[in-house]
Amino acid sequence: IANNETRVFLELHNKPSRVDGFICKLLDSKRKFAVGTLTATHQDQLREYFSKAKISILPMAVNSTFFLPSRSEFEDEKIGYVGKGWSSGEDNKLHELISSAKLVDDEANIPIQWEFLGLEPNYKSKMESEVGRYSWINSKFNFINHVSHDEVPKYLGAMSMGLIPYHD
């Protein structure tokens, strides 16, 4: 959460886990962001975590049957990003997600694995350097270059929350 101008959009398919709920409430209290979900029922459930955020139904969102079976509440928390560092010649500013992760690391006493999937090799190096600028208590990072489309569901199914940075 780099500054008040940073916008984050969360697409949630399930009720937030313990760490997700903490992060959702923290984001809701500190920054402007939006949440997308598939159904009106889930939209109502998410209001428990988001008193300020706009919660939208996304009928074109990915169907949750695409993902692997639900994660166990006792598994390590894994929060991830899937995509490139650069899109259409523009920096996706993923470094802002690292500063957001630092805020969570400072506030939460929960071990979290942050996973960034699909980065270009030079962008992966840039992100590793960004992580190295901070001292981490509970967080670990994994930066993965391109994987085949067939492998993506395996990674997505292991994540408790996905991150998508949006910018003006």
Image (tube, rainbow, N blue to C red):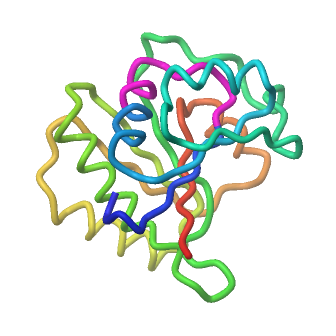
Residue at position x 11%, y 52% in the image = 135
Q: Which residues are magenta?
A: 12-22
Q: Is residue 24 left or right of residue 85?
A: left
Q: Residue furthest front?
A: 52
Q: At which x and y percent is residue 136?
A: 16, 46
Q: Residue at x 23, y 30 (%)?
A: 108
| Residue that sits furthest to the bottom in the current view | 89
Residue closer to the observer: 67 or 143: 67
Residue 42 position (above or below residue 136): above
Q: Nearer the viewer, residue 60 or 94?
A: 60
Is 38 left, or right, of 81 in this rendering? right
- The quadrant of the rendering that contains the C terminus is bottom right
| Residue 146 pos. (x, y %) | 62, 62
Relative to 8, is 150 on the left or the right? right
Relative to 139, is 142 above or below?
A: below
Query: Which quarter shows the N terminus?
Result: bottom left
Considering only vertical position in the picture, is 54 above or below 22? below
At 60% from the left edge and 19% from the top edge, which residue is drawn?
15
Q: Quadrant of residue 132?
A: bottom left
How far across and down, in percent of the image, does residue 121 sit?
A: 49, 74
* Image-based side of 143 in relation to 151, left or right: left
Q: Is residue 124 magenta?
A: no
Rendered position, 137 above or below 20: below
Occupied quadrant, residue 109: top left
The image shows residue 50 at horizontal and vertical percentages of 50, 32
Work out which residue is located at the far left of the displayed protein and give it: 135
Which residue: 39% across, 31% down? Answer: 25
Q: Nearer the viewer, residue 150 or 157?
A: 157
Q: Residue furthest right?
A: 60
Please state the total of marks drawn on the protein image. 0
